[in-house]
Image (cartoon, rainbow, N blue to C red):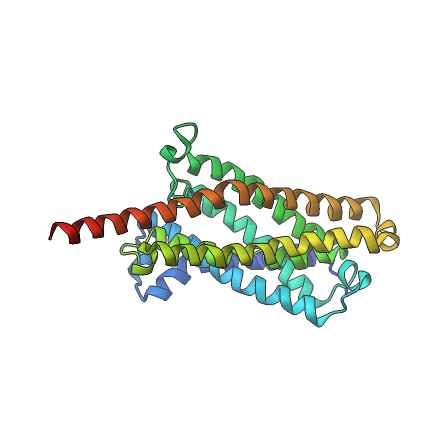
Amino acid sequence: MGVDWQQGIMLISTWCVIWGIGHHLFWPIWNARVALICSPIPIDRYRNRLCRSQVYCVLAVAGGFLLLFRYRWCPNGLLYLNSWDHQELFAMAAAHWVVAAWEDAQSCAFLGAGLTSEDTRGQSDPSKLLSRAYLVHHLMAGLGFAAVLFSQSCTAIGVFGLLYELPVLLMNHREFLVYADQPPEWFRDSRRVQSFWKKLRVLFVIGRGGPSLVYLHSLCFWSDDLRELSLGESFVYHSMAISFTALNFVLWQTFLAAWARKDLDNALRTEEGQFAGAFTH
């Protein structure tokens, strides 16, 4: 079951409209506040971004596992299988990254998610640095999903690209807490913050490390099938797998570590303040 260019563009365009509407509606509906639709302040525009992203992540992870377990776990199933489910989910993902690039451009100041230039010793503004990095990432991810959709091959790239959103479910949750008007008590408890980050790292290893291991497995045991890929298909398969594996390693070593350290430092300062206050009384 294939998809031609006209059908593919129509699918992606339809999802762009859906995500565009969702950007304006999901967060206000969640809060039951119509005023957020009519006159959102800058932080609410960023919350719009987070809420829409969270909806996408839920659909992407659920869809990724559906495709992974419904269809055959074999080279043919992960390289060439192309059902209606694949097409719809890959178009959804391609459109998500188009809309995400637009959202980031509108909310650049909040992309640091709690980090400031002080955390980089004044060397750079984390929000500006992330805005550039996210733009490159979104373009690569969107083009990757579009390439898989139109080529009707290398479907493993799309399936695992959906599963990549597994840790983002908690990353988005964290950003909601960072920009909350009143963060919950547990986010000021150092032990619970450490527990949260352990869970996030586990999901990161599963959602991001798992696909990289499958790629290495394919190099060792699917060599005959990989040689049958066309030059373009081979480029998409290897370039996407290698580049995103490298990107995840850099993310783990840099921003994930910095965010975890920042959250723990904030929690420890809160606890020290509470202890000092209790001692003085």
Image coordinates for residue 178, horizontal then vertical, percent = 35, 51
Residue 188, quarter of picture: bottom left
Q: Farthest residue in the top direction?
A: 123
Residue 243 visible in the current orientation: yes
- What residue is shown at x 48% (from left), y 39% (from top)? 130
State the count of labels.
0
Q: Nearer the viewer, residue 9 or 125?
A: 125
Q: Nearer the viewer, residue 105 or 183?
A: 183
Q: Farthest residue in the front direction?
A: 279
Picture layout, residue 217 above or below residue 239: below
Residue 195, quarter of picture: bottom left
Placement of the N terminus among the 4 image quadrants: bottom right
Image coordinates for residue 150, horizontal then vertical, percent = 72, 54
Image coordinates for residue 177, horizontal then vertical, percent = 36, 55
Residue 16 visible in the current orientation: no
In the image, 169: left or right of 185?
Answer: right
Image coordinates for residue 277, horizontal then vertical, percent = 16, 50
Q: Farthest residue in the left direction?
A: 281
Q: Nearer the viewer, residue 148 or 193?
A: 193
- What residue is shown at x 87% (from left), y 49% (from top)? 227
Q: Farthest residue in the bottom direction?
A: 70
In the image, 75: left or right of 27?
Answer: right
